[in-house]
């Protein structure tokens, strides 16, 4: 006896596909956490579209953090971000921007929830392992800065 099963038609649906810039910062690279961060992004269902290991120079720091230039903390931030190699990547997927920011956790690692990247691995406000774009506009601007060539 052969079983027959009804045919089920699945409706197509659209999801809000987004692209976002992620920086795995120099402290995460030094600590050997690149694979952990990438694995968490991929396990969540995000796709890594572009990836590059590089060192941020002063000009790129000034362009990337343009809204912070001139503030009292900026020179320390720039010194940290230019202190060694980092990984820049473009992640994409359904609601990628808020998804990555939730995975990253609160900016201050001391206050970030356990289970987030910062909550599990950071005890600093500045050396907080990861940067994630905060809006579609920021993501576009930052992706263009980091992956123009």
Image: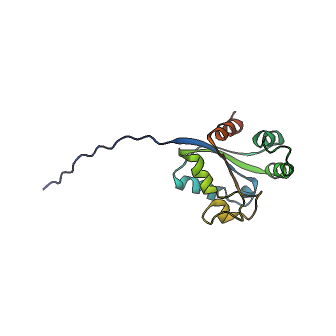
Q: Specify how the rendered protein is coloured.
A: rainbow
Residue 6 x/y as whole percent: 21, 48
Q: Quadrant of residue 40?
A: bottom right
Residue furthest top as drawn = 149
Residue in front for this viewpoint, 148 or 103: 103
Residue 3 x/y as whole percent: 17, 54
Q: Quadrant of residue 119?
A: bottom right
- Residue at 78% in and 44% down: 56
Residue furthest left as drawn = 1
- In the picture provided, is 130 more to the left or to the right than 57? left
Residue in front for this viewpoint, 100 or 80: 100
Count of picture labels: 0
Residue 45 x/y as whole percent: 51, 51
- Residue at 81% in and 53% down: 80
Instruction: Give the answer, above or below, for where 27 lies relative to 138.
Output: below
- In the picture provided, is 78 more to the left or to the right than 5? right
| Quadrant location, the C terminus | top right
- Residue at 74% in and 65% down: 123
- Residue at 55% in and 53% down: 42
Instruction: Give the answer, above or below, for where 28 lies relative to 19.
Output: below
| Quadrant location, the N terminus | bottom left
Residue 54 x/y as whole percent: 74, 45
């Amino acid at each position: 006896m052969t079983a027959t099963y009804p045919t089920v038609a699945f409706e197509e649906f659209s999801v809000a596909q987004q692209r976002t810039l992620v920086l795995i910062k120099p402290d995460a690279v030094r600590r050997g956490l690149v694979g952990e961060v990438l694995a968490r992004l991929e396990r969540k269902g995000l796709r890594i579209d572009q990836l590059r290991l590089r060192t941020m120079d002063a000009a790129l720091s000034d362009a990337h953090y343009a809204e912070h230039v001139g503030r009292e903390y900026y020179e320390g931030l720039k010194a940290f971000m230019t202190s060694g190699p980092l990984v820049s990547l473009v992640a994409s997927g359904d609601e990628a921007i808020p998804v990555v920011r939730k995975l990253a956790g609160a900016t201050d690692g001391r206050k970030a929830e356990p289970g987030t990247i910062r909550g599990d691995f950071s005890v600093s406000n500045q050396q907080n392992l990861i940067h994630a774009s905060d809006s579609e506009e920021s993501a576009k601007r930052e992706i263009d800065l980091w992956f123009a060539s």
